[in-house]
Image (spheres, grey):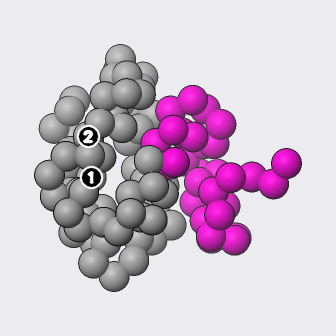
């Protein structure tokens, strides 16, 4: 379970040399939901973002965005499809209130 999440994070890191895509964020949201449904805790998933290559390859802004995607998708505030749609529409993840 943890290995799949780490693999996805590494994939995002590898592609992050340019800029993260909305599809990558959606994939991360989807994997977060899958991990949550298998019993992973939010704190553990967020801790994974602070380890190794991810922290080295992502800018602080990108790392904050990844963490936001994990939090929003973990607590059900946004589905993976909503993450992608919000990203494509405005580049912002937090829906207007």
- Examine the rendered structure and indicate whether residue 38 appears above or below residue 1: above
- 69 relative to 87 in the view: left or right: left
Mark 2 — residue?
48
- 25 relative to 94 in the view: left or right: left
* Identity of the residue furthest to the right in this view: 97
Asked whether disc 1 touches disc 2, contact meaning CB atoms under 8 Å apart, the reply is yes
Closer to the chain start, of discs 1 and 2, is 1
Q: Position of residue 52 (x, y in %)?
A: 14, 52
Which residue is at 45% across, 34% downward? 33
Q: Is residue 93 visible?
A: yes
Mark 1 — residue?
9
Which residue is at 38% across, 63% downward? 60
Label 1 or label 2, whichever lies nearer to me, is 2
Most foreground residue, 23 or 54? 54
Q: Position of residue 10 (x, y in %)?
A: 21, 57
Most foreground residue, 12 or 52? 52
Q: Is residue 85 magenta?
A: yes
């Amino acid at each position: 379970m943890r290995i799949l999440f780490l693999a996805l994070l590494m994939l995002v890191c590898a592609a992050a040399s340019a800029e993260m895509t909305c599809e990558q964020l959606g994939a991360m949201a989807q994997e977060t939901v899958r991990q949550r449904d298998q019993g992973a805790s939010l704190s553990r998933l967020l801790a994974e973002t602070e380890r190794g290559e991810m922290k080295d390859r992502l800018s602080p802004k990108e790392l904050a965005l990844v963490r936001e995607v994990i939090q929003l998708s973990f607590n059900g505030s946004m589905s993976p499809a909503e993450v992608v749609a919000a990203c494509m529409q405005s580049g912002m993840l937090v829906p207007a209130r």
